[in-house]
Amino acid sequence: MSKAGVEHQHSETAEVAAGYRAVASKEYPETNIGSDYLAEHFISASHKFLVKFGFIRKLGIKKSRKFTPGGFEYVLARTAFFDHQLLSAMKEGTKQLVILGAGFDTRAYRFADQCSECKIIELDIATTQNRKKKCLQQAGISIPENLNFASINFNLESLPEVLQKAGYDSKVKTVFLWEGVSMYLEQAAVDATLQFVSTCENKESLLVFDYIATIADSDVDKYYGVKTWRETWAKYRQAEPFKFTIDDSQVTQYLNEMGLRINTHLNEQEIEEHYLPQSNYKNLEKVAGWFRFLTASPTD
């Protein structure tokens, strides 16, 4: 695995997540966790070939569990959760969609009809965004006229300035999708992003995001898969290390300090209950123990 940072090449973790979604679209097409039928367009040619074969897909899932137990299930549940939150927001009159750290997110294309009356802004680092545009072109996937791309390095650049140039309107009811991003950012960048969302003038706006819970070394064995995840990231993922976590007991206070009120907060067991099919569905296992889903809105 490459040690080059995302400033110099597209995000490997974004491609891995797309690969998981591509596998799920073949293995579980009848469920919400297998909804991303466009994901395979964003993985390498060799991986596209492998995804075609059921026995190889199963071997890939087994290998992923060796290094990141519960990661496959986490990504699939995350897809279902974010899809659900977006579609619900659209039904409730949201007119602006901001995808923070879009990676290879396909919602603007999968849900083009549902979002047709909505301004869409996709933000990500230029290396990943440029590869995404190339993949879209190669796949013949049209970019909706209501979508704007805006490149940003969240750790170094001003989110308000970048969004303003992209046509963001603070007065409009907005859903912010922040999927698989917070854990890779510095504390200051996370604070700045949350504080920016809190300044949204439309208080019915919604932030949807996931994060990693802080787990003490003495408690690591109590949480499924976390010890193995830490070992894998230390050995293989130096280019995209985890930097930000939140203590479960402090998350409400932290969000309040950032100017946000929590609407939905799910731990790993609740994620499994609400966003994975029934227990042991086609050999699905548990979600890794440190992942959380959360939605929040600006305080009045």
Image (spheres, rainbow, N blue to C red):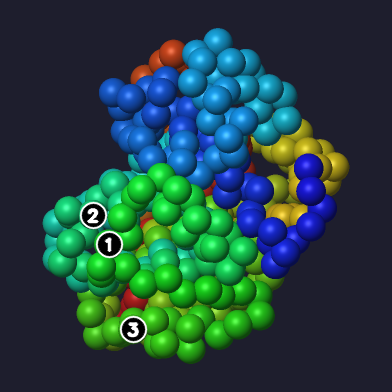
Tell me the SS state at disc 2. loop
Q: Determine the residue positioned at 59% across, 31% down.
A: 47
Does the CB distance between marks 2 and 1 fall below 8 Å?
A: yes
Counting residues from the start of the chain, the first of labels 1 and 3 encountered is: 1
Local packing at callout 3 (Cα closer than 10 Å; few below 14, some 14-19, many 20+) is: few
> Residue 170's spot in the image, x, y percent?
31, 84
> Residue 15's spot in the image, x, y percent?
58, 45
Q: Determine the residue positioned at 28% across, 23% down.
A: 30
Quarter of the image that includes the N terminus: top right
Quarter of the image that includes the C terminus: bottom left
Tell me the SS state at disc 3. loop
Tell me the SS state at disc 1. loop
Residue occupied by mark 2 = 112
Residue 238 visible in the displayed image: no
Residue occupied by mark 3 = 167
Report the amino acid beneath label 3.
Gly
Closest to the observer: 39 or 75? 39
Question: Spatial distance from mark 2 to mark 1, Cα to Cα?
Answer: 7 Å
Query: Going by the image, does 13 lie left or right of 109?
Result: right
Question: Spatial distance from mark 1 to mark 3, Cα to Cα?
Answer: 15 Å
Report the amino acid beneath label 2.
Ala
Q: Quadrant of residue 294?
A: bottom left
Report the amino acid beneath label 1.
Pro
Q: Determine the residue positioned at 32% across, 68% down.
A: 147
Question: Spatial distance from mark 3 to mark 2, Cα to Cα?
Answer: 19 Å
> Residue 298's spot in the image, x, y percent?
35, 76
Counting residues from the start of the chain, the first of labels 2 and 1 encountered is: 2
Query: Going by the image, does 286 lie left or right of 259?
Result: right
Closest to the observer: 263 or 94? 94
Disc ID at residue 144 = 1
